[in-house]
Image: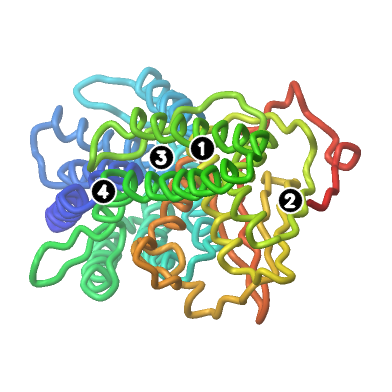
């Protein structure tokens, strides 16, 4: 089993070196360290160390894997993940407290079976679920590789280690090494060919996912956000000059108010993005989702008016939830601006709708503009990819949207036919403030502007 130790620790080093900025990767590194150290129990002779390594292998490894799966699946808020990280340690502590200790730790494998196997199985389910729900084709492929990398070895561990030790039928632990080698081969091959879990191996070091996060979260993302607001201010000041010539003072006052709102938003962004190459800071707080949509519409009002676009909204006056209202407004404003660019001036229509499914809060941004082909859809959320081919378009807007929603435990997808496109945001219902729960069916409004 010394080979299993070497492989596990080698994979841990590779993952940490290339993908340490990803939260899920950190948990996978911890899982591999537990597994690698635990495998030393087969070669260490001294009883105390042997039993310690064995306890780490049997009791700590399931915890590391389940936490990796929880974070990797992007299905829960940060608060829930932090709570689970503490709560899921309790079975390990209880197992240690009730385990007889003489010269070594004498584990009860039946008790261990009842909580460790569910940890592994739930973890496998979450990894597979993350693949099933992914809509981006490139990321879906990478998640499928992750499924093949982690799920088969884990299921083998459940079958040949935990079940075998609990029912004492045969000694199958020796065969686990074969599946560890298989996982290692899959990992190296995928890392060379596609990149997996933040690791891309070529002749030179590549930090693809870290580069995305650094670019989008730091200076380039700030540049992109400021660019949008500066364009707004430039358009508004131009219109103010025209209004002053015709003495349209009421409209001028409105434009001045909009300029002040844009500059405040810019200052908020500057204050919140503290370091150029670190992760975007998410500050959750209670807010009215409908107000955020309204502010995003207002920031694009002049573009809607200039193109004569019909805007249809379908959501309640109040829809309270917990989110980062600053970044969420930026996401909505980006999607509205993209929809404006996609539609024609003559008969353009944009519809914004908030509704619920069984599990998610859904915000839809639909337009009747040019459709998006499948090849383009697969690349829409990649950094620097743009279909606009204009000097002031950097191809970072949708990547920013994807990362912000991922940090909220949500996702974004797009459906497009030959004409029109619908971008759908999914946020977990756990973010809804239940004390102010509203009946969407009764409070919906339909208005055409």
Q: Please report whichever mark, 2 or 4, sits nearer to the chain's N-terminal start.
A: 4
Labels 1 & 3 near each other (Cβ < 8 A): no
Name the foreground residue: 233 vs 411. 233
Question: Which mark is in front, 1 or 2?
Answer: 2
Q: Alpha-carbon distance for marks 2 and 3?
A: 34 Å
Labels 2 & 3 near each other (Cβ < 8 A): no
Q: Please report whichever mark, 4 or 1, sits nearer to the chain's N-terminal start.
A: 1
Q: Please report whichever mark, 1 or 3, sits nearer to the chain's N-terminal start.
A: 3
Residue holding disc 4: 214
Question: Which mark is in front, 1 or 3?
Answer: 3
Tell me: 428 left or right of 261. right
Q: Residue furthest right?
A: 442
Q: Alpha-carbon distance for marks 1 and 3?
A: 18 Å
Q: Please report whichever mark, 3 or 4, sits nearer to the chain's N-terminal start.
A: 3
Q: Residue 199's spot in the image, x, y percent?
A: 23, 60
Q: What kind of element bears circle 3?
A: helix
Question: Which mark is in front, 2 or 3?
Answer: 2
Instruction: Point out which mark residue 114 bears.
Output: 1
Image point 38% across, 55% down: which residue? 154
């Amino acid at each position: 089993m010394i080979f299993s130790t070497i492989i596990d620790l080698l994979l841990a080093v590779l993952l940490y070196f290339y993908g340490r900025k990803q939260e899920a990767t950190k948990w996978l590194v911890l899982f591999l360290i537990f597994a690698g150290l635990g495998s030393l129990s087969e070669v260490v002779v001294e009883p105390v160390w042997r039993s310690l390594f064995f306890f780490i292998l049997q009791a700590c490894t399931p915890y590391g894997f389940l936490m990796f799966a929880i974070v990797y699946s992007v299905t829960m808020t940060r608060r829930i993940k932090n709570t689970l990280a503490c709560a899921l340690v309790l079975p390990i502590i209880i197992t240690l407290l009730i385990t007889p200790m003489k010269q070594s730790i004498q584990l009860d494998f039946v008790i261990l079976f009842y909580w460790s196997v569910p940890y592994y199985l739930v973890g496998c389910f979450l990894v597979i679920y993350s693949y099933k729900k992914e809509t981006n084709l490139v990321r879906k492929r990478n998640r499928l590789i992750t499924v093949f990398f982690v799920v088969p070895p884990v299921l083998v561990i459940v079958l040949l280690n935990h079940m075998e030790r609990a029912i004492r039928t045969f000694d199958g632990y020796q065969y686990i090494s074969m599946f560890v080698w298989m996982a290692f081969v899959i990992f190296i091959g995928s890392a060379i060919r596609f990149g997996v879990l933040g690791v891309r191996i070529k002749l030179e070091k590549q930090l693809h996912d870290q580069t995305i996060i650094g670019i989008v979260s730091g200076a380039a993302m700030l540049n992109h956000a400021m660019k949008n607001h500066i364009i707004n201010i430039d358009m508004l000041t131009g219109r103010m000059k025209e209004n002053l010539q015709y003495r349209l003072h009421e409209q001028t006052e409105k434009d001045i108010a909009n300029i002040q709102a844009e500059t405040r938003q810019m200052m908020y962004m500057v204050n919140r993005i503290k370091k150029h190459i670190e992760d975007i800071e998410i500050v959750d707080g209670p807010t009215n989702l409908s107000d955020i949509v309204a502010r995003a519409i207002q920031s694009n009002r002049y573009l809607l008016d200039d193109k004569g676009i019909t805007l249809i909204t379908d959501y309640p006056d109040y829809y309270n939830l917990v989110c980062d209202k600053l970044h969420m407004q930026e996401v909505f404003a980006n999607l509205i601006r993209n929809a404006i660019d996609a539609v024609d001036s003559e008969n353009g229509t944009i519809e914004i709708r908030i509704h619920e499914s069984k599990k998610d809060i859904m915000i839809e941004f639909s337009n009747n503009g040019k459709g998006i082909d499948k090849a383009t859809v697969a690349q829409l959320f990649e950094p620097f990819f743009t279909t606009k081919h204009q000097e002031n378009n950097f191809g970072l807007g949708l990547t920013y949207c994807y990362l912000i929603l991922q940090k909220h435990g949500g996702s974004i997808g797009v459906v497009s036919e030959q004409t029109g496109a619908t971008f759908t945001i999914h946020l977990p219902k756990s973010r809804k403030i239940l004390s102010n729960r509203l009946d969407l069916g009764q409070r919906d409004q339909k208005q055409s502007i």
